[in-house]
Image: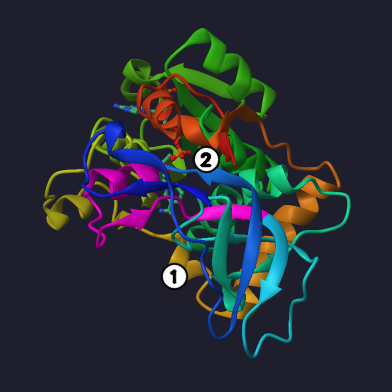
Amino acid sequence: MRAIIVNTPGGSSALDHTEVPDPVPGDGEVLVEVAASGVNFIDVYQREGRYPLPTPFVAGSEGAGTISATGPGVTEFAVGDRVAWANVLGSYAEKQAVPVEKLVPVPGGLDLDLAAAVLLQGMTAHYLTHSTYAVQPGDEVLIHAAAGGMGLLLTQLAKKRGAHVTATVSSDAKEKLARAAGADVVLRYADVAANVRKSCQVVYDGVGAATFEDSLAALRPRGVLALYGAASGPVPPFDLQRLNPAGSLFVTRPTLGHYVATRAELLERANDVLGWVADGSLDVAVYHRYPLAEARQAHDDLEGRKTTGKLLLIP
Ligand SMILES: NC(=O)c1ccc[n+]([C@@H]2O[C@H](COP(=O)([O-])OP(=O)(O)OC[C@H]3O[C@@H](n4cnc5c(N)ncnc54)[C@H](OP(=O)(O)O)[C@@H]3O)[C@@H](O)[C@H]2O)c1
């Protein structure tokens, strides 16, 4: 099969489109014909070696497709089932062996590419708005990079829960998208400090180094900074004592794996998110569907702040 392999971590040229043997499903695994793989920032961190992985590896960790074979001991799923998964390395490929405990069924009527587009970021937006901090009606919420893959979903879910959303973006075109997703106020990053001070119950910050100080300053006493990513780079070491005079603030650095830690929790979040997309109450904006062979271009575009919404690779 064709796949995108990383032999030596580095820039986007580390992504090699090449021929590799088909995976063979082991105990408790199925083989899936991948219809679409989601591109996520974590794929960039893994490609760069910032999140080190043993090499060589097939890149990507999110996809959707149709089961073509089952390994020993698989009873929950069968050949022909339409499924999606997140946090399983090896999705930038025509085929992937996926453990059944990571599979979620894709509802009839929902396109596989939309399932691949929403699962990882949708479940992340779900846990951030329902569990890390459970947004309440009337809450003031600040969401950075609101026109991005995560940002558009977070904005919609925070609005669904009744929040007043202030969003940040870098351009007029991105502002339009953030407003369409429901943001009440849209700011450029440089205007946050002057406009949002000590008023937010929660800040959702996936930008990291560039926004961290403004995010802290935006929180009201006992507010929560959910630092869920670092698109601009990691936040430098931080003196915890600063949280005390700033208002007994909370800072957390959450990750999806810990919020889909049981099969029940995974299915609950996945079924919510896929169900909302299927019934039209959650919009997934696919920025571009790149052929698998163009994985390098997809990474360059994502890192270059050129994109909005979700990027897909189509084998
Ligand atoms: N913790 C978790 O469970 C989890 C799960 C999924 C994703 N994430 C994290 O969420 C973050 C967003 O991921 P995503 O895939 O949805 O990406 P994205 O938001 O679609 O793309 C990143 C956006 O960040 C903004 N940005 C600001 N400064 C930037 C810089 N210096 N370089 C690049 N981008 C910059 C850009 O929007 P503007 O041009 O509008 O500024 C850019 O479009 C990533 O850090 C990712 O690792 C975390």
Residue 23 screen position, x and y as percent: 51, 66
Scheme by which the image is coloured: rainbow
**Span shown in magenta:** 41-64
Instruction: List the residue tagged with mark 2.
Output: 150
Work out which residue is located at the far bottom of the displayed protein and give it. 73
Q: Residues within 10 Å of mark 1 (few under 14, many from 20)?
A: few
The alpha-carbon separation of the residues under discs 2 and 1 comes to: 18 Å
Say left or right for 181 vs 241.
right
Instruction: List the residue tagged with mark 1.
Output: 258
The residue lying at 58 percent from left, 84 percent from top is 28
Query: Does the Cβ of the disc 2 residue fall within 8 Å of ligand 1?
Result: yes
Compare residues 147 and 309 and report the one nearer the observer. 309
- Any part of residue 115 in sight: yes
The residue lying at 42 percent from left, 43 percent from top is 18
Element at label 2: helix
- Any part of residue 129 in sight: no
Residue 4 screen position, x and y as percent: 42, 45
Please state, as top left, top right, bottom left or bottom right, where the C terminus lies in the image: top right
> What residue type is disc 2 on?
Met
Say left or right for 186 vs 212.
right
